[in-house]
Image (cartoon, grey):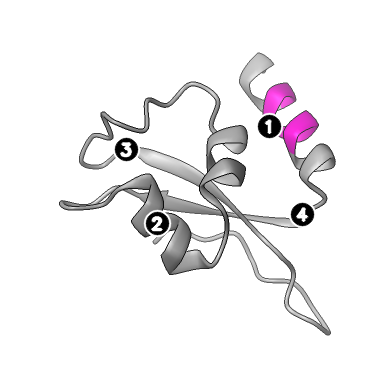
């Protein structure tokens, strides 16, 4: 529950409304994931305070903060 409290606090501070769950694939870096979802590396790192950006593991789940789509919101989904 402490983990979720940290995420909720970070989400409020980041002023974002949705989070996608990204599963790390071969060749992924935090920077490439940030580019894919058009968010900053800083926001990904703030939303995932316990990850080591230099040691991502295959299959690891990352919370990726994304803005809402105008007129509705994106649903959190696994990618």
Of mark 4 and mark 2, the one earlier in the sequence is 4
Of circles 1 and 2, the one toward us is 2
At mark 1, the secondary structure is: helix
Q: CA distance from mark 3 to mark 4?
A: 22 Å
Q: Which residue is mark 1?
A: 7
Of mark 1 and mark 2, the one earlier in the sequence is 1
Q: CA distance from mark 1 to mark 3?
A: 17 Å
Of mark 1 and mark 3, the one earlier in the sequence is 1
Of circles 3 and 2, the one toward us is 2
Q: Is residue 59 magenta?
A: no
Measuring 36% from the left and 33% from the top, which residue is drawn there? 53
Measuring 17% from the left and 53% from the top, which residue is drawn there? 27
Per the rendered image, the range of residues in magenta is 5-10
Of mark 4 and mark 1, the one earlier in the sequence is 1
- Name the main secondary structure of what is drawn in magenta: helix
**Do residues under tags 4 and 1 come within 8 Å of each other at their CB atoms?**
no
Q: Return the x and y of residue 1 as percentages of the image width and height.
A: 67, 18
Q: Which residue is mark 2?
A: 33
**Do residues under tags 4 and 2 come within 8 Å of each other at their CB atoms?**
no
Q: Residues within 10 Å of mark 1 (few under 14, many from 20)?
A: some
Of mark 3 and mark 2, the one earlier in the sequence is 2
Q: Return the x and y of residue 47 as percentages of the image width and height.
A: 61, 37
Q: Which residue is mark 3?
A: 60
* Position of residue 33 in the picture relative to residue 1 (left or right): left
Q: Which residue is mark 4?
A: 16
Q: Residues within 10 Å of mark 3 (few under 14, many from 20)?
A: few
């Amino acid at each position: 529950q402490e983990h979720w409290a940290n995420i909720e606090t970070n989400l409020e501070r980041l002023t974002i409304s949705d989070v996608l769950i990204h599963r790390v694939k071969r060749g992924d870096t935090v920077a490439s994931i940030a580019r894919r979802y058009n968010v900053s590396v800083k926001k990904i790192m703030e939303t995932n305070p316990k990850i080591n950006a230099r040691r991502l593991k295959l299959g690891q789940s990352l919370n990726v903060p994304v803005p809402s789509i105008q007129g509705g919101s994106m649903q959190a989904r696994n990618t």
